Amino acid sequence: MQDLLNTKKHDETRQGEAFAPFALDPNVYSKRFYIESYGCAMNFSDSEIVASILNQHGFGATRQVEEADIILVNTCSIREKAEQYVRQRLTEFRRLKDAKPGLLVGVLGCMAERLKLKWLEEEKLVDMVVGPDAYRSLPALVEEAETGQKAVNVILSRDETYGDISPVRLDSNGVSAFVSIMRGCNNMCSFCVVPFTRGRERSRDTASILKECSDLADRGFKEVTLLGQNVDSYYFVDESKDEVVNFAQLLEKVALISPLLRIRFSTSHPKDITDDVLYTMSKYENICKYIHLPIQSGSSRILQLMNRTYTREWYMAKIARIREIMPDCGLSSDIIAGFCTETEEDHQDTLSIMEYSKYDYGYMYYYSERPGTLAHRRYQDDIPLETKKRRLQEIVDLQGKLSQESNKRDLGNTYKVLIEGNSKKSADDWMGRTSHNKVMVFPKGNHQLSKGDYVDVFVKTYTQGTLLGEIVTK
């Protein structure tokens, strides 16, 4: 069993997935870069910032790694397996480098920040190590590496947001786009390495966010996902307007750009999502009725060890409040099995809170100790691997049941779906998502529709991860 299991894969979490950007005009760019990204949506968004910076300095993108002058790997440190896979890829790229003198290999992102000089000096796998706040220095680091020097910049910033950089949309479907609204995290959950790899929390200026979203709408995009480690703590002081903007207010400002522009966001921390956010979501039809609200554990004792700053009862009250304000709101969660000292009673608490919350789908893991975290320093990783796997499988099985029940409740209903493209299984079918972030597949028929159109779809049947329907003829 892998240490990452999920009942549904979607754009906001692409753990272990690699991609390379589109090819650009060879007459404009004399050098080529190839980039692979792993982990969360923030990493994929960062790769689009990196692409923009490199474009401005004469580097074009290629899908073919053999054509590249620079290979970049944007990394994730959340799970041990992700690090192992990245190490494997770097070893493969090292063989390419041996066969192609002058080829540079660089590591970006969270692993670069965490491992720093290890890969440069001990293992000699890479030529450049660039942390998440140092992407502006990448062209200078490339020049330094081209001279044979090892190029490093992993300095964390208290104010870098890349707010003035227009991302290059990599492998874009032309319909949906990520928009980063903040960086870093202040929460210090004991299992999480993010505060150490991405630094302290800071919010991007509101005007630049609205400009980016407006530009996307003008270019025909129909959906933006506002990204942050904890979007609900967004807080920007606009001194020029003597205005303070919180997340609920930002949501409203983005929603008012166009009624045809859908808004999603990720991720929320249960302690920070407010009634104002919920009421704003319910007020605007184009703000999607879906919240990813990680619980991590259903045990108050384990939540305290995790430093999640809420109890089981508090979380349940938040779920009840969401259902009260938005009865049809979609919900998903992150759950960790086998955290330090977890008992069978703690595990049962997690299963029961899943039953209470009735998640549409979830992202489920067994605990993977990360060096440098508070849990690594304070607690013993004392749950046997076999027990972790067994508990995780029970969580996965329950979520499969909950997902089936959730989709069954949608039978006979009609939902507005944004068409994202062809179904993976057949070019005769469209694939899109509902406001509740459920995937819908339906026949194209003779309808004159295109990617990016909205259409009403009647749910005829379902699988655990997909709704199957037909277009409603008006």
Image (cartoon, grey):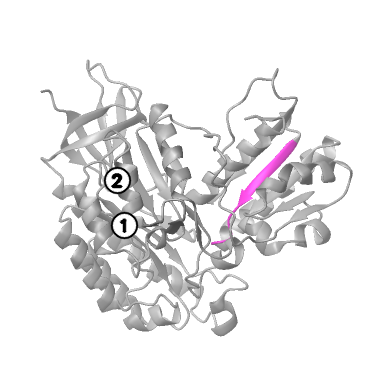
- Of residue 330 and residue 136, the one placed in the foreground of this image is 136
Say the numbered circle drawn on residue 332: 1
User: What element does badge 1 sit on?
Assistant: strand
Compared to residue 72, the image places residue 447 above or below, namely above
Q: Give the side of residue 452 with respect to residue 55, left or right.
A: left
- Of residue 70 and residue 1, the one placed in the foreground of this image is 70
Q: Give the side of residue 102 with respect to residue 241, left or right.
A: right
Say the numbered circle drawn on residue 437: 2
Question: x and y percent of residue 112 in the render?
Answer: 68, 57
Question: x and y percent of residue 195 in the render?
Answer: 55, 67
User: What element does badge 2 sit on?
Assistant: loop
| Amino acid type, residue under disc 2 in the picture | Asn
Q: Are marks 2 and 1 in contact (CB under 8 Å)?
A: yes
Asked where in the image residue 33 lies, by quadrant, the reply is: top right
Measure how far apart labels 2 and 1 are at the Cα level. Answer: 10 Å
Magenta part of the chain? 70-78
Residue 76 inside the magenta-drawn segment:
yes
| Amino acid type, residue under disc 1 in the picture | Ser
What crowding class fits label 1: few (fewer than 14 Cα within 10 Å), some (14-19), or many (20 or more)?
many
Q: Residue at x 29, y 77 (%)?
A: 312
Asked where in the image residue 394 lies, by quadrant, the reply is: bottom left
Compared to residue 143, the image places residue 88 above or below, namely below
- Of residue 146 and residue 58, the one placed in the foreground of this image is 58
Q: Give the side of residue 55 with respect to residue 407, left or right.
A: right
Question: x and y percent of residue 96 in the render?
Answer: 77, 38
Compared to residue 363, the image places residue 286 above or below, namely above
Q: Residue at x 40, y 82 (%)?
A: 304
